[in-house]
Amino acid sequence: NAGVTQTPKFQVLKTGQSMTLQCAQDMNHEYMSWYRQDPGMGLRLIHYSVGAGITDQGEVPNGYNVSRSTTEDFPLRLLSAAPSQTSVYFCASSYSRAGDTYEQYFGPGTRLTVT
Amino acid sequence: TQLLEQSPQFLSIQEGENLTVYCNSSSVFSSLQWYRQEPGEGPVLLVTVVTGGEVKKLKRLTFQFGDARKDSSLHITAAQTGDTGLYLCAGGGDTDKLIFGTGTRLQVFP
């Protein structure tokens, strides 16, 4: 199993450009999430999905779109990049273990710089 | 809004020392997870605790969930350079959404 894969690993964008961060998992997990990580702020949830065709907003959704057409893929789209979106982005997948515990499996991250 | 505060934010110690990292909240969580993240990589799950007062051990790492399920601690005995990394706690509720703590960056020197 490759686990959770993310592409690209690094990206530099100019303000106003758009792009898609790719995420795929091969563990047949129902749940997938996108987080951003900024210094001193831990991980903040951007969008998440509980299954194909179902997505919902997290804590910091503005400026980002997602879709989930298959169980495996969960791309994150930046509509019009802004310097405030400079961050490291992590995709994660999870499943429900016993009851309410959802253990996250993270990808290696995409480091995005917006100039 | 549920928040998880971790302390200390930074910790720099010598090999062989003991340390404790704290994760505190005013909210009750149904589960508490601890992750370790190394530079350039995603976080990796270390442990999940689900019962108030629960203690779990992973070699030299001891994790405890508070009796009221609002806080947790991670104790490392005889730290090694391989323990260096960012430690994140994450609280779970009744959905798949996790609330992550602010993180503790640990540096262990030889």
Image (spheres, rainbow, N blue to C red):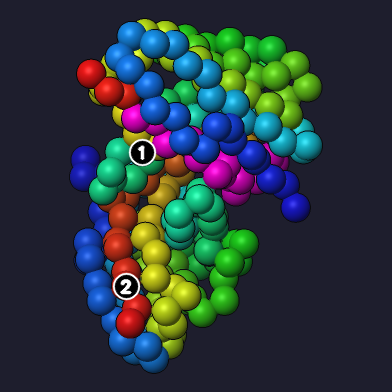
Which residue is at 37% across, 60% downward?
A88
Q: Which residues are magenta?
A: B93-107
Is residue B24 depicted above or below A93 in this figure? above
**Label 2 neighbourhood size at 10 Å, few (<14), some (14-19), many (20+)?**
some
Q: Quadrant of the N terminus of chain A?
A: top left
| Residue type (three-letter) at the residue carrying disc 2 | Thr
Q: Is residue B87 shown left or right of residue B33?
A: left
| Residue type (three-letter) at the residue carrying disc 1 | Gln
**Label 1 neighbourhood size at 10 Å, few (<14), some (14-19), many (20+)?**
some
Magenta-span inclusion, residue B103: yes
Residue B72 x, y percent position in the rendering: 63, 24
Instruction: Check the residue under mark 1 and report the chain it is in.
Output: B
Q: Secondary structure at mark 2?
A: strand
Q: Quadrant of residue B93?
A: top right
User: Can the viewer see residue B35 in this picture?
Assistant: no
Depth check, front residue: A9 or A94:
A9
Is residue B71 depicted above or below A82 in this figure? above
Residue pointed to by mark 2: A113
Is residue A104 depicted above or below A17 in this figure? above
Q: Quadrant of the C terminus of chain A?
A: bottom left
CB-based contact (under 8 Å), mark 1 and mark 2: no
Residue pointed to by mark 1: B37
